[in-house]
Image (tube, helix red, strand yellow):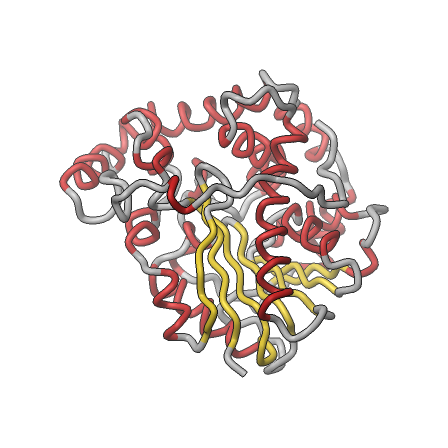
Amino acid sequence: AARPRAAAKRGAAVVPRAAAAEKAKPDWAGDDLLSKVVDLAINNKLLYEGLMKPMARRTLINTAEKNGVAWRDIAAGLAKDKSLQKHFDAIVDDTIEYPGYYLKPFHAYAEGNLCWLAAFEAEPATYSMALRVYPNDRITADQAQSRLRDSYTQALRKHHDAHGAGEPTTILDVGCSVGISTQYISAEFAQANMIGLDLSPYMLAVATHRDKGVAGSERRKWVHGLGENTRLPDDSVDIVSLAFVIHECPEKATKDLMTEAARVLKPGGTFVMTDNNPKSAVIQNLPPALFTLMKSTEPHSNEYYAVDIESALRESGFEHVHTVDTDPRHRTVLGTLKQ
């Protein structure tokens, strides 16, 4: 598959709030009985290792490859590229202490995000995710990716123009993975310097590799670090973004991320996150096989679907807090740091 476009495309649809289901979250997450039954199945090692884990991977790979994304070829090509180890050595910070919640088998990888295979497969996995958002639309993988990312960047642009303190000069993308969200935000705010920060040096090595020679790469910097302790100065950035990050965090880490965002943002700065929408009718009505597979690869799902993001932002000092349903599966939550 082609690399995602560097320039954002206008016109992506935003899903009205009225389209969301009435329930606050799906029954298969949190403390509900169904959730507990699913958790028991996931905690059965034989079921997880022998059935759920390989099925989850096969579902994602098949979605990608039947739509023209050469998942296995992309991963194999990166595995052969010797420059990635050099990027890794240049970016890794050996003083980083990984929090316990991060040392989980995310996305059916035994080492979670801390391995080469997860990094090699991250980009095709995002194509698979995007395609599954629009299952009935006759669109390519590139079009699905662009629609997914454009809806997020457009919601960010609209909010920042309305409530921010002028055109941003520095943007922090926390949990940037292999840099796809960073590139799309960078294209939308073409005068801003970007910091792509992630806890996985493997992901950052691939981000560096992907960004080589791409328009605007001179404005993007890749940093190995914690979103809860960025080591950036107070009041130093205009926007803090977390794209598809918070579902991988327990509630305490989520609130710590917001506290750190409030510290590094300038007064009038924008916080934005996008992730699965607990109120989405699509998410709430997933077939049992699919929600079990999805939950089996996301260790912190129960806490994610129960946390009140808007209230947590307000408690952290943000105003103009609101949620936009940016596609049938995802929501974008935005707020402005009080001046």
- Residue lying furthest left: 33
Q: How many callouts does the rendering have? A: 0
Image-quadrant location for residue 2: top right
| Quarter of the figure that contains the C terminus | bottom right
Position of residue 63 measured from the top left corner of the image (x, y, whole percent): 53, 22
Residue 224 shown left or right of residue 334 in the figure = right
Residue drawn at x 40%, y 23% is 55
Could you say which is closer to the camera, residue 73 or residue 167?
167
Residue 53: horizontal and vertical position, in percent? Answer: 39, 29
- Quadrant for the N terminus, please: top right
Is 311 placed left or right of 193 in the picture? left
Which residue is drawn at the image coordinates 30% and 31% (left, top)?
285
- Front one among 173 and 146: 146
Report the side of 153 relative to 44 (left or right). Answer: right
- Return the residue nearer the eye: 193 or 313: 313
Residue farthest toward the top in the current orientation of the protein:
66
287 lies above or below 306: above
Residue shown at the point (43%, 36%) measured from the top left: 108
Location of residue 196 in the rendering, given as x and y in whole percent from the top left corner: 65, 59
Give me the residue at 17% from left, 44% from top: 32
The picture places residue 275, in percent across and down from the top left corner, at 46, 48
Indicate whether 244 appears above or below 294.
below
